[in-house]
Image (cartoon, coloured by chain):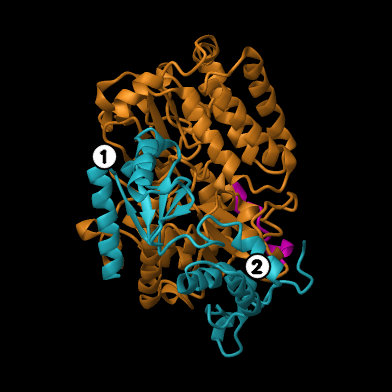
Chain colours: A orange, B cyan
């Protein structure tokens, strides 16, 4: 298929330069859109395109844009665009691949989004671990400024917009949009109460839109080719656009690919050489640590927002983690819960104290100390902490637990009856 | 939690000379950002001093117009900011799910054996600190570690491979 987000690639595997991006059709839409389209027309086309946020929550992007005050609602002061490149969801590496491959797609998307929402400044909030990627973005921003595509009076139009990079210190909660804004402002990165939402009071208490990298990179194509074109890219009728899918864990050839949204897990897994070592598939976590397990019976479900919700999980980031028949889902969930417990910002009690208790309970099962009572406690705990905590962190942690109990209850019970992990010996053999 | 001083002077401001009412965008050097720079300030202090000691907290506080307490809230919050000595080079070993499914535990055990330290400890000669970290976002290269500014992976977990990895990290530091 034709790649859209990754339409330009650099020679020798580096990021595509400005010239390479232009040769692939990049920045074609920008000058025309700034001259011919009104901001409200841009919002309308993004709304019509059906684009949904690629950071995990899947919120309709055009609707998000329409929440930003404009016209009579706007006081005339600054509004900001914030790109969330704080990719830290376990198993997720798609935004890194996009930035490494085609950084100008993000820059063009940010300029267009900024124009649509009447913003004149954008920031890219990137985790510090992405050293080389941030350097590559800095370089691309310089290229765009040099070509008058960024800065004052872009491409001869009356519109001015600039982009700056903020390198963070690495912490998962900074991916939560309001924690991100606090982190950016140099405060401790705890989430803020909502409402007010960032659309009205965000960065420095000004209207702000926070978008994932991939979401913004979808915008140039939509503006250039229109909403119907974007819808037509999808593999399923309710979908829109392409998606950066990743596969890791127990797959033969782990990688990130751009495919029509709604491509099935079976097709993606096949493309990645199937399960490692020719083993059978036990299950997958479809879109990063905070999505629920799916099993081989879900292989033909389209990897898109609505179909995966119907299947009891979520698309999340679209980067799946595969478990083979040799990988214990309880041990894997324990690993996920250690992550969530460690990365809790510590601000509210259900999350700060509940998540370590969940880790302890799962450790009991893995070490052979588990009882039936522990199974009940795990279910109760994760049912309670999500709705009672301040942000979505603990609710995200509850997702893989839900999937574990829904699909792998016999394995959980076996941990109790066999007084330990029935997979222990198999795992020894795999990684010996 | 709102800032009584209001938003700093950042963002677009009407330019006096520009024709057609175009907005002028302030460059990063012109803006009066202070506390927003705290992570960068702490990072460069850490690079100079090896870790963020109490003196560095005070220096950063002065630089960013914060109290030392506010700086410490931030210095202790981020994974890559170190409030204790952690060796000349930190080896951050990913222990999240994709790496775990590809042998991260074995890799960390072997690193620990070869270096003679546990997680969170520094080698006797002060060369390496071995630290756990969450997903590094390089899952197609699992299991992987971050050393200096470079991600290494996919890594083998046998002793010879881990010794070769340490040599690569030393060579890279030498050439940096």
The answer to whether residue A357 is left or right of residue B22 is right
Relative to A403, is A139 above or below? below
Q: Earlier in the sequence, mark 1 or mark 2?
A: 2
Relative to B118, is A70 above or below? below
Quadrant of the rendering where the N terminus of chain B is positioned:
bottom right
Quadrant of the rendering where the C terminus of chain B is positioned:
bottom left
Disc 2 marks which residue? B71
Disc 1 marks which residue? B158
Magenta-tinted stretch: A63-74
Label 1 secondary element: loop
Residue situated furthest right in the rendering: B4
Chain name for mark 2 = B
Chain name for mark 1 = B
Callout 1 touching callout 2 (CB < 8 Å) = no
Relative to A136, is A348 above or below? above
Residue nearest the observer in this picture, A251 or A77: A251
Residue at image point 53% right, 9% down: A417
Residue nearest the observer in this picture, B141 or A215: B141
Q: Quadrant of residue B147?
A: bottom left
Q: Is residue A78 visible?
A: yes
Residue at image point 41% right, 47% down: B93
Q: Is residue A9 visible?
A: no
């Amino acid at each position: 298929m034709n790649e859209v987000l990754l339409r330009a690639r650099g020679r020798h595997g580096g990021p595509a330069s400005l010239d390479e991006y232009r040769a692939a059709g990049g920045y074609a839409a920008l000058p025309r859109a700034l001259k011919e389209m009104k901001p409200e027309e841009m919002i309308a086309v993004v709304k019509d395109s059906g684009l949904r946020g690629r950071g995990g929550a899947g919120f309709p992007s055009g609707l998000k844009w329409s929440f930003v005050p404009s016209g009579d609602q706007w006081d005339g002061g600054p509004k900001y665009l914030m790109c969330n490149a704080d990719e830290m969801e376990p198993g997720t590496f798609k935004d890194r691949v996009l930035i490494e491959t085609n950084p100008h797609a993000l820059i063009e998307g940010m300029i267009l989004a900024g124009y649509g929402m009447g913003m004149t400044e954008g920031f890219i909030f990137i985790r510090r671990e992405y050293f080389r990627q941030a350097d590559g973005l800095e370089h691309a921003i310089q290229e765009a400024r040099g070509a008058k595509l960024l800065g004052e009076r872009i491409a001869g139009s009356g519109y001015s917009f600039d982009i700056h990079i903020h390198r963070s210190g690495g912490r998962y909660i900074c991916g939560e949009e309001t924690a991100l804004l606090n982190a950016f402002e140099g405060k401790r990165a705890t989430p803020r109460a909502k409402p007010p939402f960032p659309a009205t009071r965000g960065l420095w208490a000004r209207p702000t839109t926070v978008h994932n990298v991939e979401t913004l990179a979808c915008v140039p194509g939509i503006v250039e080719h229109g909403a119907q074109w974007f819808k037509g890219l999808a593999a399923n009728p309710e979908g829109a656009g392409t998606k950066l899918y990743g596969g890791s864990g127990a797959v033969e050839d782990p990688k990130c690919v751009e495919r029509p949204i709604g491509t099935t897990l079976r097709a993606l897994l096949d493309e990645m050489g199937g399960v490692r070592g020719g083993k059978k598939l036990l299950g997958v976590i479809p879109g990063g640590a905070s999505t629920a397990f799916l099993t081989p019976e879900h292989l033909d479900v389209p990897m898109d927002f609505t179909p995966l919700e119907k299947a009891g999980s979520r698309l999340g980031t679209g980067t799946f983690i595969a478990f083979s028949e040799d990988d214990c889902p309880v041990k894997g969930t324990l690993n996920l819960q250690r992550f969530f417990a460690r990365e809790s910002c510590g601000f509210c009690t259900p999350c700060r104290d509940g998540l370590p208790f969940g880790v302890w309970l799962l450790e009991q099962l893995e070490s052979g100390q588990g009882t039936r009572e522990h199974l009940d406690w795990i279910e109760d705990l994760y049912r309670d902490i999500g709705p009672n905590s301040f942000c979505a962190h603990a609710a995200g942690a509850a997702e893989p637990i839900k999937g574990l109990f829904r699909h792998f209850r016999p394995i959980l019970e076996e941990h109790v009856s066999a007084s330990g992990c029935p997979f222990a010996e198999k795992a020894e053999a795999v990684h010996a | 939690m709102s800032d009584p001083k209001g938003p700093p002077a950042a963002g677009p401001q009407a330019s006096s000379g520009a024709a057609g009412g175009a907005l002028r965008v302030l460059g990063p050097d012109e803006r009066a950002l202070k506390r927003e720079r705290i992570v960068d300030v702490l990072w460069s202090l850490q690079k100079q001093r090896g870790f963020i000691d109490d003196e560095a907290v005070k220096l950063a506080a002065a630089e960013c117009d914060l109290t030392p307490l506010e700086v410490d809230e931030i210095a202790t919050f981020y994974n890559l900011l170190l409030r204790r000595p952690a060796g000349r080079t930190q080896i951050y070993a990913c222990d999240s799910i994709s790496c775990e499914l590809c042998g991260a535990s074995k890799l960390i055990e072997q690193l620990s054996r070869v270096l003679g330290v546990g997680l969170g400890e520094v080698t006797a000669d002060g060369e390496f600190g071995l630290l756990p970290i969450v997903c590094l976002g390089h899952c197609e290269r699992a299991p992987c570690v971050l050393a200096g500014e470079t991600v290494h992976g996919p890594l083998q977990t046998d002793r010879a491979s881990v010794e070769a990895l340490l040599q690569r990290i030393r060579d890279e530091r030498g050439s940096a």
